[in-house]
Image (cartoon, grey):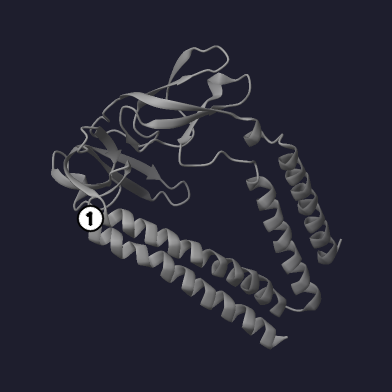
Amino acid sequence: MEWEQVLVLWCAGWGAAALVGYALALAGVTGAQRMRHFTGRVERVREPRHGGSRVGGISVVVSYRDPVSGQDIQVTNDGERGDAITAAWVGREIRVSHPPGRPHAYRFSAMAEKPGRGLSGPGCAVFLGYVGLVALASVERGWPWALIGVGGPGAIVAALHLPGALRARKDRLGRLAAMDAVRGRVVAVLKDVSVDQDDGHVSTTITPVVSFSTREGMAVTAHCPSGLPDPAGSYGRDVTVHHAPADPACFTLDVEAARRSEAWEIVFDVLAIVVLGATAAAGVALL
């Protein structure tokens, strides 16, 4: 079997998989669409142990009401329970989801996130099929088609993403300007050590845990992955926390650094448009 035939089969297979996936999504029968979703509230927050691990997030007890039985159900985030909760306070809303008839298989996610529709699988199939088409065009018509196939759509996607990124940056800068400044304290420093199975390289991740109270008296415990000098030796340190009044999970210890970092996403998008556009133009010139 020649390369062209292999690539044709590749494209046909992933194209068929994408069609099946989108058909299931339109019919509303994907696993994500069949999930049952509930609004839970944090009832208790357990302060992380100093020197412990950040894996699994902050330990909480969440309660939600089952509309069928009318009973209040309490669950914890022990083990693999979906998104890690990295900021917690009593009363915070958390989405609890589980497959039909399997309440023990519950998962947590932030309320700000929309429930999934099961489109990630078909989208991945479309991408893999497109990669096959680009490779097929390159094999049959010459390698410059690979430059066009990669650079052209990539530049278009980056250009479409840029306006949304600009709006999001403006919103984030507005939130930074409106943040409340309160006193906080580092109540634990978490340490995770991982070993690369290939070369034996050991890497260590340090995650300080900060505790602070909002002006309304809401006690918040949260992972603080950045913005703290000497995080390994920060246990017990008093800090100033800047948080969004409406959402204490949106916080920073260094407002100026947060403002500077907002520019990098825009710079990356512009560079992507320029580089990918130039790649596509080079491919056209070489045909």
Label 1 element class: loop
Residue 77 shows in this picture: no
In the rendered image, which quarter contains the N terminus? bottom right
x and y percentages locating residue 230 in the rendered image = 19, 51
Task: Say which quadrant the C terminus sits in.
Answer: bottom right
Query: Residue 76 location in percent, x, y?
Result: 41, 23
The picture quadrant where one finds residue 210 is: top left
Residue at 85% over, 62% down: 5
Label 1 amino acid? Asp
Decide which of 242, 233 is in the foreground and name it.
242
Q: Which residue lies at the image location 38% right of the left edge and 51% below the top edge?
A: 201
Residue 172 is left or right of residue 167, and the answer is left
Can residue 271 be seen here? The reply is yes
In percent of the image, x 78 and y 68: which residue is there?
A: 136
Q: Residue at x 74, y 62 (%)?
A: 132
Q: In terms of depth relative to the viewer, which is nearer, 269 or 133? A: 269
Query: Where is 140 relative to 89, above or below?
Result: below
Above-or-below relation of 273 to 218: below
- Local crowd size for mark 1, using a 10 Å CA cut-off: few (<14), some (14–19), many (≥20): some
Judging by the rendered image, the residue that carries numbered circle 1 is 254
